[in-house]
Image (cartoon, grey):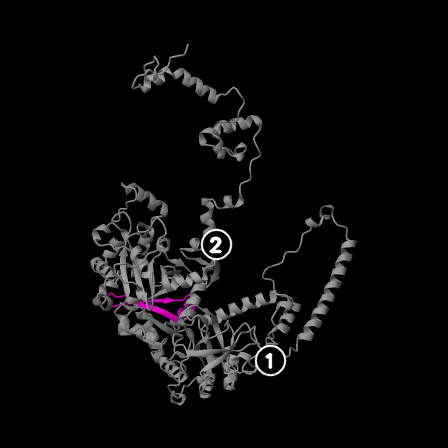
Amino acid sequence: MESTEFDATLGGSEHLPTSVNSLKFAASRSVEIAAMTESILNPSKVRLVFQSLPVHMRRRVMSHNSKRLPSKLRKAHLEQLKKSGLPPKQQKPSRKHRRRPQNLLNQYNRRKLCNIWLETHIWHAKRFHMTNRWGHRLAEAPCDKVFRACYRATSKHCLLQDISYYTPIQITGDIDIIKEMFSAITDSSIGPTIGAKAYTTGTRQGEIHIYEPNKFPFGYVGKASFIWEPYVEPNRKLWLFVHPSQSKQVEKCFQNLICSVKKITESERNVKRQKISNVYAECLNITYLSESFNRFRLTGPNSHAILVNSLKCIEDIENIKSNLWVEQHSKTNPNLYLKVKEEYWKSISPAQSPAQLSPKIIVGLIVRDPRLMRPTYRTKAEPDDSYTQLSREALTRVPPTVSASPLWSTAIHQDIKLKVRTNGEFIKHVTKLNLVPGEVYENDPELQSVPVVLIQRPGSQDWCYKKLGYGLPFWQTFIMFGARAGGLRETESLALEMGECNLPPDSEAGTANEERIELELKEKYFKLPPKKRENYIKLGINSPFSCPWKLLLKDWTNKPVDDFYVLRNGIILDDWQECLKRKKHFNCIQQMNNADSCLVAVYLRLPAGNLFRNALICLPKPGDITNVKSLFEPPHEDPNEALRRQTRAEHVKTLKKLRKLRVKQRKRTPKPALLLDKKYEKKPKIKPNQEPSAYMKLMRELWLPSNIDTVRKVASRETMGYVAQGAFSFTEAHSCGIGYVAYNALHTLIASAQTQVLVRNPSSNKYNLAKIEIIKCV
């Protein structure tokens, strides 16, 4: 007989209810549930705790590492392990142990003592090759291959660089006295000085060339940018931004002007200069504020769009009244001009590129915390598609109050730094206020506003200044909006692409840079085995790793040169360029007093071939231009070759004798039992900076003689100058370089009706043709 115990709808005899009370149903089955739970937790078979997990959650390492199990099962698992015997405790990873939070900060502070770290140092150290320069630990180049990508960023997108290592100097005093002091260390023939009307209003940034007091054209120090603070007061403030390689020399110049360095006898005393020095000391106050600002350089057409997306202006002062720095600043200057700044920033925001803006304008803004504007994912900030025509007034007329910024008031710097929220504090605070996920309350009075200063550079570049403490939040926001980070290598390549001289040779900074590069190249050269080294003597190059400028000028003047300078007079340089274009005769150029000690900066373009650092710039002979393809330097005789071989052979014999003596000594002296095995022998440690031996010094002298008497007529073509920086230029699609030639050599070139020169790399005997132009931006 068939069973009919199933649902009546299917022909059975059981009638099931349409609904079930879950509590009653669970209560009636409580005994069954308890029995099932007991059988799972205490199985009759012997099973380990991790075997109770589903198969997809099991890991082999669970048998000896309890942290791989869910937290609720770890205690039971450890009890089982105790019964079977705990495995040996694993040794803590040393690096993980060292980088514990309580030790990490102390370690960073200790490492900062040798070289100053920028605020973005940790970010760079994870992604860049770092180097020690000018007392700072700076980013050299990215670890990945992004040389071309960085160029594309400058030409089409945005390249971001941290140049906070520049030294700011604040000079306070009467504007006439400041102008008078700077007249001793600058010259109007080079360009506008600090007293130009375009700069004294404080709406534009200027650049000056600084010289040692009353030594022009000799004693060049370097180029510096300056800003006049726009507030109208009895005492004006001038901000000078100096490269760190020149800061000590600039400080020395000011000391020489303000106070007498040495005692002068009555007969030698210059009464007028002494009076001026007393006036400077009484009326001027000079303050060196290193590590006071974060300074970022944005280069490229998208730099303006990144700033527009990252910086949101404060519109109402009521939103920031609770800020400590606002209360401090309102005591001296209650008006922040928020409305004017916000309206002007909106009027120039539609610009497609910073090149559309007025050159070198200064815009001081007060913006919200940049972390509020940061996108969740990295996106590319682009100009607004709905292009709106910029008003002519916004481009030409800059309101005077727009340039004013509380950032120049050093009294509020400490207040801003004290109230900076860390990323953890910022996220915790924002999460509390976010009632709707993803929504951010931008006008939060608890979050501190930040004063920033933007400065436009001619072309497509922007400077961004901000107070120390907010460097990393701004940096990361710019990166998230599509900026690409660069280092010192990108600074040099940018200078080459723009045809500007980086650290000229007539300055102490340029000389130190050349010595550093020479030392690096020599060490790299002598690390090679002798058969892999270029024989520069046979190539006719007696100075392959340096540029002997004084020797070059001596050869072209036939008299010793103690000091030299680079020509920076714009009028004379324009005349020489006209002569190269054959639009002007060289006899029309005005005579110079110190022409024998003068170098002229030139820009070289090669139609074919490569150009490298320290290449020779040579004077072509008649017929060289047409036969340049077959023009080679004939091989020279090397007088030291036989002596090198003899010295090497004698040195090898000496080494063999010493080795035999060591072997005999070892055989006579019994070794201790512990040192019978070779792997336990203590080998002498080699010091990395150990001074080379007498033999190494002799061999280096034989490879590269240091007693150089002449450079002009060493090769078959006369040397006019040297290439200070050379590489492939993506802008020109050819190899290009920046070099310096002797003034008399340039005169000889133009007198021979030549407009092109020959160049030869240090490791080649091939001459290449190059077009030559005069550089004005030295």
Looking at the image, residue 185 sits to the left or right of residue 564; the answer is left
**Coordinates of residue 239 in the picture (x, y in percent):** 32, 66
Nearest to the eye among marks 1 and 2: give it.
1
Other-residue count near label 2 (Cα within 10 Å), few / some / many at <14 / 14–19 / ≥20: few
What stretch of residues is rendered in magenta? Answer: 223-251
Q: Is residue 247 magenta?
A: yes
Q: Pointer 1: what residue?
A: 634
Quarter-wise, where is residue 650 in the image?
Answer: bottom right
Q: Amino acid at mark 2?
A: Arg
Residue that appears at 34% across and 53% down: 417
**Label 1 residue SS:** loop
- Point out the residue furthest to the front here: 1
**Coordinates of residue 709 in the picture (x, y in percent):** 57, 81
**Label 2 residue SS:** helix
- Point out the residue furthest to the top here: 1
| Res. 560 visible in picture | no
**Coordinates of residue 144 in the picture (x, y in percent):** 47, 57
User: What's the mark number on residue 752?
Assistant: none
Q: Is residue 287 magenta?
A: no
Residue that appears at 31% across and 59% down: 305
Q: Is residue 275 above or below residue 66?
A: below
Q: Amino acid at mark 1?
A: Pro
| Res. 772 visible in picture | yes
**Coordinates of residue 306 in the picture (x, y in percent):** 32, 58
* Quadrant containing the N terminus in the rendered view: top left
Residue that appears at 37% across and 58% down: 483
* Quadrant containing the C terminus in the rendered view: bottom left
Q: Earlier in the sequence, mark 1 or mark 2?
A: 2
User: What distance separates the C-alpha of mark 1 from that of mark 2?
Assistant: 53 Å
Q: Pointer 2: what residue?
A: 111
Q: Is residue 415 above or below residue 772?
A: above
